[in-house]
Amino acid sequence: MNYEQWLKLFGRAANDPDVAATVALAGISKNLAIATDELSVAADVPGQGLTIVFTDESILRPDTGLVGRPVLTSVTMLLKHPSAPQLYRGPLPHGLTSDTTQAAMRQRFGAPIESGDGRPWDVFRVDGLDLAPTYSRDLQSIARLTLRVPGGR
């Protein structure tokens, strides 16, 4: 599986037939219910280096969303990690590679809308989605890349 299979399902509920079928095909057996004290639920895609996240619909649409209804809002690709059993090997969005530097990301996408220093990361708004790389400590590569619906977790 690759990120594109999940991307086309963004904004749809966990009980949507296409989402449920893709979750089953991916081998995800985790209950995708959101706990009452949480805002989201995450599930790893076995053997793929991917994590998907469902956000409570009431966070995404405060006026009309149903409390506790999980809506698919993000996919994270694990690209580099010293102890990860499985890394993502599929295509990356926008022609990126795991060797894309922070400087190259900022040159291409402009100033990030958010960033952090502890484990260096940025968030760029690209084509209506948040593109959020987490970089290696030396800023010379992307360790993890997340695509998410704005406001999603």
Image (tube, rainbow, N blue to C red):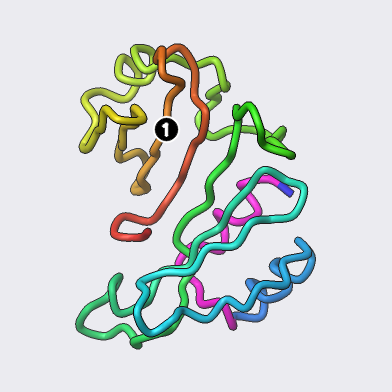
Local crowd size for mark 1, using a 10 Å CA cut-off: few (<14), some (14–19), many (≥20)? many
Residue found 60% across the figure and 31% down from its top: 79
Q: Is residue 96 magenta?
A: no
Image quadrant where one finds the C terminus: bottom left
Q: Is residue 33 above or below residue 74?
A: below
Picture quadrant where residue 117 is located: top left
Q: Is residue 7 magenta?
A: yes
Of residue 131 and residue 55, the one placed in the foreground of this image is 55
Q: Where residue 83 appears, x then y in whole percent?
A: 66, 32
Q: Which residue is mark 1?
A: 133
- Asked if residue 27 lies left or right of residue 93, the reply is right
Residue found 43% across the figure and 83% down from its top: 69
In this picture, which residue range is highlighted in magenta? 2-15
Of residue 102 and residue 64, the one placed in the foreground of this image is 102
Picture quadrant where residue 66 is located: bottom left
- Asked if residue 56 lies left or right of residue 70, the reply is left
Residue found 43% across the figure and 25% down from its top: 135
Q: Where residue 5 appears, x then y in whole percent?
A: 65, 54
Question: Callout 1: helix, strand or loop?
Answer: strand
Outermost residue to the front = 83
Going by the numbered disc 1, the residue's amino acid type is Pro
**Dominant SS in magenta:** loop
- Asked if residue 140 lies left or right of residue 49, the reply is left
Residue found 50% across the figure and 30% down from its top: 94
* Number of numbered discs on residues: 1
Q: Is residue 84 above or below residue 149?
A: above
Q: Where residue 72 appears, x then y in whole percent?
A: 49, 66
